[in-house]
Image (tube, rainbow, N blue to C red):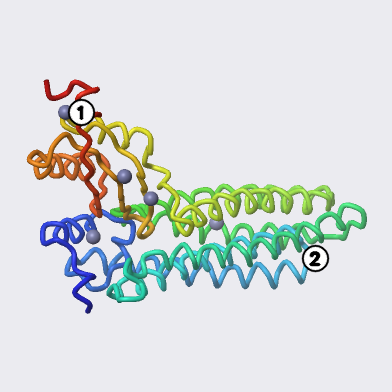
Amino acid sequence: MSEFLSHDDTHEHVHSDSSHNNLDHGLNHGHSHDHRHVNAKVLMWCLIATFSFSIVEGIAGWWINSIALQSDAVHMMTDAAGLLIAFVANHIAKRPDNTTLTFGYGKAEALGALINCMFTGFLTLWLLFEVVGRFFDPEVVDGGVLFIVAGLGLLINGAIVFILSRNANSLNIKAAMIHAMGDVLGSVVAIVAGAIIYYTHWSVVDPILSLIVIVLLLVSNYKLIKQSVIVLMSGVPEHLDYEQIGHDLKSVHGIVDVHDLHIWYISANQSALAAHVVACNLDSWPSLLAECQRILLEKYGISHVTLQTEFDDAKCRAAGCCD
Ligand SMILES: [Zn+2]
Ligand SMILES: [Zn+2]
Ligand SMILES: [Zn+2]
Ligand SMILES: [Zn+2]
Ligand SMILES: [Zn+2]
């Protein structure tokens, strides 16, 4: 451990405090709260169920020529991969900072998500290619099997929603639950499609359903890519208002200007801020610094703050703040 990695004492405390509310709450093994273990176990079971069902869907889809089932197999596989990445990244993120990675491993999840998005993107394009072909050259699909497999999917997705709703005490569990509720809806649509094909033999329903799955996959993939890139490119966190934060710092009495303001992600749920602050005089700086830190922590939850002070008598006189 290098001496230069150390934080201020108070600052260190703030860091560990804020980790109580963060997204990876449910996956932290090294903590004494029992529900964390429950959450990790619950998510692991959801992962296994999702992955197993994606295999069943893939095989059934290939067997009855259903491109819709194959598309949903890709979707469920992507869901399982997302859960797995969250697991692995949370373990990696607990490694201590070092002299090469001074911000630690907090961005590992964003990196994993981006790689997952790349694979999903390729698979989705391949599906799109296949689906377009199906419209020109339709294949006979067994609606009965589609109905049964979709029904199985409804049971599994429904069970996942039920289990998660009883354990929804952290943000990542809630996010997983909301996603699974969308998947339940998808299963219902697939059941209806299976019934329509069974009774009417309109096999074109199958590629239409597949197109819906593909569009949803593309939309969620785009959102995930955007979020990951903002984290990895040190962009301003989406929940923070850059202009408002600069304005709040500048409106502290005794501060006449704020510039070179940077706000960025350290990890998926922790932000850092650095700025140049022009103060009226040297004597007031300790109290100004404390006030800035208080605003940033209490109003915006930013605990990793670095402020460089500059003094400008002319600006102070022009602003008339110390008359
Ligand atoms: Zn899903
Ligand atoms: Zn700068
Ligand atoms: Zn400056
Ligand atoms: Zn720090
Ligand atoms: Zn002044």
Amino acid under label 1? Cys
Query: Which residue lies at the image location 45% right of the left edge and 49% below the top edge?
Result: 178
Q: Position of residue 62 (x, y in %)?
A: 76, 70
Q: Is residue 189 left or right of residue 202?
A: left
| 111 to 244, vertically: above or below | below
Q: Position of residue 301 (x, y in %)?
A: 25, 46
Q: Residues within 10 Å of mark 2 (few under 14, many from 20)?
A: some
Query: Which residue lies at the image location 30% right of the left edge and 54% below the top edge?
Result: 170
| 298 to 159, vertically: above or below | above
Residue 8, quarter of the rendered image: bottom left
| The residue positioned farthest toward the bottom in the image shown | 1
Residue 4 in view here: yes
Residue 74 circle label: none
In the foreground, 308 or 26: 308
Q: Which residue is mark 1?
A: 316
Residue 29, quarter of the rendered image: bottom left
Query: Which residue lies at the image location 84% right of the left edge and 54% below the top edge?
Result: 132
In the foreground, 130 or 292: 292
Q: Which residue is mark 2?
A: 65
Disc 2 vs disc 1: which is toward the camera?
1
Residue 70, quarter of the rendered image: bottom right
Query: Which residue lies at the image location 74% right of the left edge and 60% below the top edge?
Result: 125
Q: Circle 1 — which element?
A: helix
Q: Position of residue 68 (x, y in %)?
A: 72, 57
Residue 198 in view here: no
Residues at marks 2 and 1, CA–CA distance in whole angstroms: 75 Å
**Quadrant housing the C terminus:** top left
Disc 1 C-beta below 8 A from ligand 5: yes
Q: Position of residue 284 (x, y in %)?
A: 9, 38
Q: Earlier in the sequence, mark 2 or mark 1?
A: 2
